Image (cartoon, grey):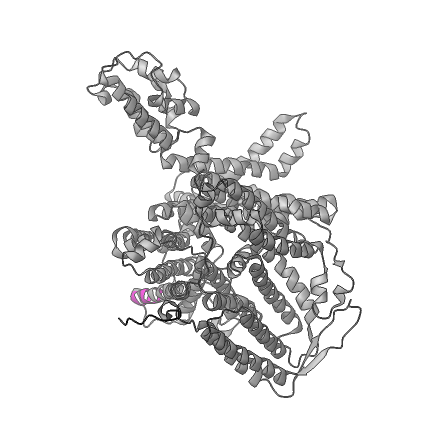
Amino acid sequence: MSVSAPTRPTRDPVLLAPISWRTPIIMTVLAALALFGFALFTPAGLESTIELTGASAAWQLPDLVIGSRAAALALVLVAFALAGLSFWTAQNRRRSMAVPVVFGICLVFAFLIWAVAGNASGLPLPFLLSTAMTAALPLIFGAFAGLLCERSGVINIAIEGQLLAGAFLTAVLATVAGNAYVGLIAAPVGGALVGLILAVFSIKYRVDQIIVGVVVNVLVLGLTSYLFSTVLSDDPLRLNNPPQLPALRIPLLADIPVVGEALFNQNIIVYAMYAAVVALHIGLFRSRWGLRVRAVGEHPKAADTVGIDVNRTRYRNVVFGSAVAGFGGASMVAAGLAFTKEVTEGRGYIALAAMILGRWSPTGALAAALLFGFADSLNRVLNNIGSPVPYEILAMLPYLATIFAVAGLVGRVRPPAGAGKAYPS
Amino acid sequence: MSENNDGREKPERTGAQPDAAQPDADAPSQAAAPQQPEAHTEAEPDGRGPEDSGRARRAAQAPAVPDTSPRPHPVDDGPTSSQARWATFRHEMLTGSWLLTLLAIVAALVISSVLIAVADADVRASAGYFFARPADLLSAAWSSIAGTYVALFRGSVFDYTVLTGGGVAELGRAISPLTKTMVEATPLILAALGIGIGFRSGLFNIGAQGQVLMGAATASLVGFTFVPPGTGPFSSLLHLVLALGAAVLVGGLWAGIAGILKARTGANEVIVTIMLNWIATYLVAYLLTTAVYRVQANRPIAPHVAETAELPSLLGSWSPLHWGFPLALLAALGVWWLMERSTIGFQFRAVGANMHAARTAGISVNRVFVMVMVTAGMLAGAGGAMQILGVEGTFRASSAGTIGFDAITVALLGRNRSGGIVAAAMLFGALRAGAALMQTVADTPVDIILVIQAVIVLFIAAPPLVRTLFRLPDPQRTRVAARAKEATR
């Protein structure tokens, strides 16, 4: 070895992880697909119409009418530029979530422009976003429930059951009381009861958490379906006819073009969701409570050593998290819809996926859940106004996109280290 | 002091041949025990007096009790060994897993009875004047509960109502429900075997639903498009093998996507399999609107598979049982061999027990991930094919039903072992088979089946809860106590 030691500390290149080119390559491929799919083969003369303001907005903007091919081409070119930028960030070992997110938005808009090209009715963008928010609500609260539980070390597969229980109790109690807000109080109770089963079996009896979760889902599905087919069906008008939760319009803010309706002309559950995101983010990452919860989830023994009651923390978090999911379940009947068998349609599992996709963080889970909600509502809207893509293929897209995201963009996500393991009391 | 009654009446029996000395006491109950859960009540006439479960628990704990009672022959080993033998036997009986399973099923049925009674219209009507005529409520509840369970039994095991007196054909019709149970169990066995392999290898595969669906879709496609050369049993066998093989292949490939993504990119298999379920659902729904499935006039139903591709009937026309059931049992045997006796199975289990240790030991964990998922998918795909080639014949979007999700519960109930899965699938198959008759005869909605299934699995998963409910001894605690007594002796 040479005796001349390096004069200034340089980072040993061997110690650095190899540069991952996966994200930029996937982005380039997707941009290329979009170039051929949405831009080049669109006939030149077509125009795309996009509504910018909803019916209730105070000041109306005229519909946006643009040449389909030129606009899609411009967006795809921006996407290519972002893919190039992504190569640059990868080369410099920077991690940026903004680039893929903006990239995704560009491609979605390129797709939208292509999908409504030549369509006379135009794309009702504010309506689309507004229904996306409604569709995302159960997913958001479900994902929050999942992360509250998993951050404390209990895997919550039972989100589906908690949503279902929340929706069931909301529908019944709101109908009986004749007041939609009573249903909102009942919803968390339903979720918490389901969470209590999960907690008792997984914490006290130390049954495998995934097993309990799956079984509890079956149990709640069976219970609610059974009660629906017997008791509720006997007298649907007096038991299963919940009033609609009114939309609370915030003046001025709701008049913002494009997003105003979606964000500020919604029922109280949406506003509760805003509060929940902020509270959870600060609570988990900036408060003593959050530190303790995360310690219990990551290294229960260490937490126990410093005097945190591991299992009590877990009980509290599971029951509280499940109540959050139950509250989210209320959003599925908030529009004055009657409860039906399996009204959740697997949304609990999608919420689980959103939580993992969002890497166990409230903001990430929110973004992922909104994405699913947007895809769901886009599919409905396009199906209504007539789209060139078959309904089933379009419905498949968000799930395909999730697989791409999990495999390419997110990669190896790491759950809390203590999740899934019971802690001896 | 009641626990020492046993001890007091036994001393005169010498310890030389305790078994021969009390054939009337122990032998019958021992013989009865494996089949008869109520062995304790059966064993009463031997003079020990009525034993409730609470006393049984105290008796089983007898060795743990300090010497507070007079011991007639402290030096003689005979009576204590006989007493210990009886205690051990009773202890094993009360802590055995079969008893827990049985009690879990009983508890599930009891809980469901409450639901059945509560939802019954007559019961609720009579509850209105309960204090005036309480008997009405009880009889209404009894009739609704008994009616439900009797219908469930008739629909799944033995329909005694068709028996009018003699005739083998009549007997066939009576046990036809049992064969229907086997038919229902067939796809559950196959899909649950795959899920069980995943669980034991540390992979949580929620994707059986999608794999079953893809298998069913493939079996149907091959079943109605392929025309086997020539005629006769051999060409039929060729067609059947092709359809089944294609379904197995596609199921394996479909699950393999999740395995490869997990191995290559670390993508969480729970997410990927959930997503693949949805993609399979929509893909199949889309294909059923296209010319691929020769759909006519907006009816999203595939043509019936050719006769050559159908799984032949096993018992004749009186029963729906087809060759899929023995094939599924064969698959269970194969999975048992794979997991317990083969090197690959050892690697699977090693990865499931401790991934890092397995990697350190030189096992390619990533290859195991792919292999586990492919194997699971192949089994689930076969399960889907059974449903098409053996039962339905025509494929539609709902052909997979909830087989894939039920199979998760079956695998959990069967503790991921082949034998357990077959037994659990038979139980769930019986519930599924009997559900239709239960709904039509007893007017109890089929959804109660889900409750029964879930409660059974919950109780079986938590033995301490069942022990608390039925006041059974805790095997660990009594063992520890016995050891402590040995030490103090």
Residue A361 spot, x, y in % from top left: 54, 57
Residue B349 spot, x, y in % from top left: 32, 52
Q: Is residue A344 above or below residue B214?
A: above
Q: How many marks do you count on the picture? A: 0
- Residue shown at the point (73%, 70%) measured from the top left: A257
Quadrant including the N terminus of chain B:
top left
The residue closer to the viewer here, B19 or B186, is B19
Which residues make up the magenta segment?
B234-240
The residue closer to the viewer here, A122 or B213, is A122
Residue A260 appears left or right of B464: right
Q: Indicate yes or no whether the magenta region holds residue A16.
A: no
Residue A3 spot, x, y in % from top left: 28, 71
Q: Tell me if I can see residue A154 in this picture.
A: no
- Residue shown at the point (46%, 74%) measured from the top left: A92
Q: Is residue A227 above or below residue B103?
A: below
Q: Tell me if I can see residue A370 in this picture.
A: yes
Residue B455 appears left or right of B390: right
The residue closer to the viewer here, A80 or B189, is A80
**The furthest residue to the bottom:** A44
Main secondary structure of the magenta stretch: helix
**The furthest residue to the left:** B16
The residue closer to the viewer here, B403 or B178, is B403
Residue A41 spot, x, y in % from top left: 56, 85
Quadrant including the C terminus of chain B:
top left
Q: Indicate yes or no whether the magenta region holds residue B239.
A: yes
| Residue B67 quadrant | top left
